[in-house]
Image (cartoon, grey):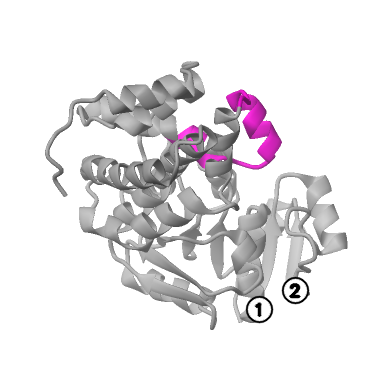
Amino acid sequence: MNKIAYLGAGTWGFALATILAQNGHQVTVWTRDGAFADQLQKSRIHPKLAGIEAPPNIHFTSDLKMALEGADGLVESVTSSGIRTVFEQVLKQGPIEVPIILTSKGIEQGTGLLLPEVVCALMGVEESPLVGCLSGPSHAEDIIQNLPTSVVCSAYEPNVMKKIQELFTTPTFRIYPNSDIRGVCFGGAMKNIIAIACGIADGLGCGDNTKAALMTRGLHEIRKLCVVKDCKPETLNGLSGMGDLCVTCMSRHSRNYRFGRLVAEGFSPEGARQKIGMAVEGIYTCVSARELSHKFGVPAPITEVTYQIIYGGLDPREAVKALLQRAIKEEHL
């Protein structure tokens, strides 16, 4: 049995913490919201995952020091925009000497850093042997019901990948190792932008043909841009690329898809975000990806029009026209 400090009490954190607890580990889930921690500790049920009770070996707290004390491993499920602040708080408690498993998906604005790179930078190293990640097509709503799911793990060191597999693997939660941590994280971050675009297309009534084109060209866009982060393009053919892209663009559980659809149906971006009531990572990552595209001169047309819809007031119908009016080039795969 391991003692796991778990940062983040959203639906994703609740679901993965449940897996860890079901595997016999003692899990302390931390959230900065003291009232929410108390609510979860008393009710044992997440309000967004009604009816699913947390196992008895999960404890909820807003006391970060208590959560970290004696931990054999640290798992993160906060937000991409909040990960730097959270780990700054963690490091104030002392140096981290246990495996760090990141499960959020995003690219930091301004720096262009992938989330493992953010944590490593805070630790004062380029690559920490302690840092790994878990990614792939996996909605909390399915995981919490033990529906069959396959994901991918990665790390800077193979022993951390093995540790992730040991901690999380269940008969219905299958984990494939992949040593390309940058590629794994990049695919997981970028697919959220394409999912917003697919939601917009569906909200406009564009049809399945349009969504298929957006997904395919979106994957091509991700592959083109991934090289600026020293990723292996072939990684994007796997679970953290194509797999995660499919589920996020097509599932009713996808916040990014739902956000795009609401915007197309007339909600303002802020109104759509508030209606969903949870983090929509593509809103944040869209800015970061656009920054990378401009910095390195790599065209990313789907990212660009999605950004203009969210931040520039572009009408979604005009965005579709802009994409259709782009010059057609030979399809290079």
Q: Quadrant of residue 73?
A: bottom right
Residue 276 is situated, as x and y percent measured from the top left of the image, at: 67, 39
Q: Secondary structure at mark 1?
A: helix
Mark 1 residue type: Gln
* Left or right of 325 on screen, residue 268: right
* Left or right of 90 on screen, residue 332: left
N-terminal of the pair, mark 1 or mark 2, is: 1
* Left or right of 197 on screen, residue 64: right
Residue 237 circle label? none
Q: Which residues are magenta?
A: 266-285
Residue 278 is situated, as x and y percent measured from the top left of the image, at: 65, 42
Specify whether residue 69 is in view: no
Residue 286 is situated, as x and y percent measured from the top left of the image, at: 43, 33
Residue ID for mark 2 = 55
**Which residue is pictured at 43% across the width and 73% down the height?**
175
Nearer to us in this view, 279 or 246: 246
Determine whether 239 is above or below 325 in the image.
below
Determine whether 309 is above or below 330 in the image.
above
Residue ID for mark 1 = 22
Nearer to us in this view, 76 or 304: 304
Mark 2 residue type: Pro
Nearer to us in this view, 297 or 266: 266
**Which residue is pictured at 38% across the width and 72% down the height?**
176
Q: CA distance from mark 1 to mark 2?
A: 7 Å
Classify mark 1: residues with Cα within 10 Å, few (<14), some (14-19) or many (20+): some
**Which residue is pictured at 35% across the width and 33% down the height?**
302
Q: Quadrant of residue 74?
A: bottom right
Determine whether 274 is above or below 319 in the image.
below
Count of numbered badges drawn on the protein: 2
**Which residue is pictured at 48% across the width and 19% down the height?**
315
